[in-house]
Amino acid sequence: MSNTTKWGIVAEFESPAAIFKAAEKITAQGYTKVDAHTPFPVHGLDKALRQGPSHLGWIVICCGAMGICLAQLMMYWMNAVDSTSWVSGKEPYAWPSTIPITFELMVLLSGFGAVFGMFGINRLPRLHHPIFNHSTIHRATDDRFFLSVEATDPKFDSTQTARFLESIGGKHVEIVEE
C-alpha cells in the first residue's frame, strides 16, 4: 500500500517560444501555482507566469543598513567610550576615519544577506524535490523546457490540467508524486 500524494503535473516543451506561449495560456486560464524549468533564462517568462518581483533586494538593503549602523556603533564605542585616545589632534570619535570600516561591514553583511536570503527564499538546501520524479526532467539542464503545476493550485484537477497541458503543446505530461 502506497502513501504517496500528488505533488503536481509536469509537461515538457521543445523551445523557448513554446514554453512562453504555454505559460501565457496557462496563467490566462487562472492557474497560479505554475513554475518554469529551463536550461537558460527565457526573456519575459516571469511576466508570462505572473511572478512578482524578488524580495531579495530588500533583504540585502536591510543587511547593508544594519552593517552601517553596527560599524558606526562599534567604532563609537571603541574610540569614544571604551578606549579614548586623541590621535593627530582629532577628537576620539572622528566620523571620517570610520568610513573604511563602515563600508567594509556594510558590504560584508550585504553579502551574507544576499546568500542566506537567497537560501531562505528558495527554501534551500533541499536534497530532493518531487519534480525530480518526472521521467525527462533531467533534460531541463540541456535542451528542454518544462512547466509544472502544483497540486495546491486552486484550479488543479489531475485529468483536466493534464489535458490542458497537452492541448497547448506539452509532451511527456506526467503526474508527479511526492
Image (cartoon, helix red, strand yellow):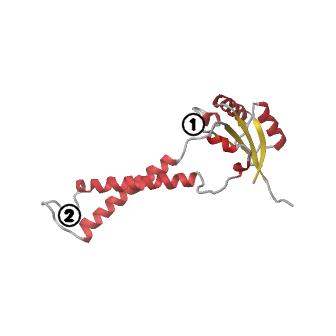
Q: Could you say which is closer to the camera, residue 16 or residue 48? A: 16
Callout 2–callout 1 Cβ contact below 8 Å: no
Q: Could you say which is closer to the camera, residue 66 or residue 150? A: 150
- Look at the picture and state if 20 lies above or below 175: above
Q: Could you say which is closer to the camera, residue 23 or residue 55? A: 23
Distance between the alpha carbons at the discs numbered 2 and 1: 53 Å
Name the kind of residue labelled 2 in the image: Pro
Name the quadrant of the C terminus.
Answer: bottom right
Q: Residues within 10 Å of mark 1 (few under 14, many from 20)?
A: few
Q: Secondary structure at mark 2?
A: loop
Identify the residue position indicated by label 1 in the image. Answer: 41
Residue with the most extreme right position: 1
Which residue is at 66% across, 55% downward?
128
The reply, left or right, for residue 152 in relation to residue 112 is: right
Name the kind of residue labelled 1 in the image: Pro
Identify the residue position indicated by label 2 in the image. Answer: 92
Instruction: From the top left corner, tell me how far across and down residue 131 is, in percent.
Output: 70, 48
Which residue is at 67% across, 44% downward?
138
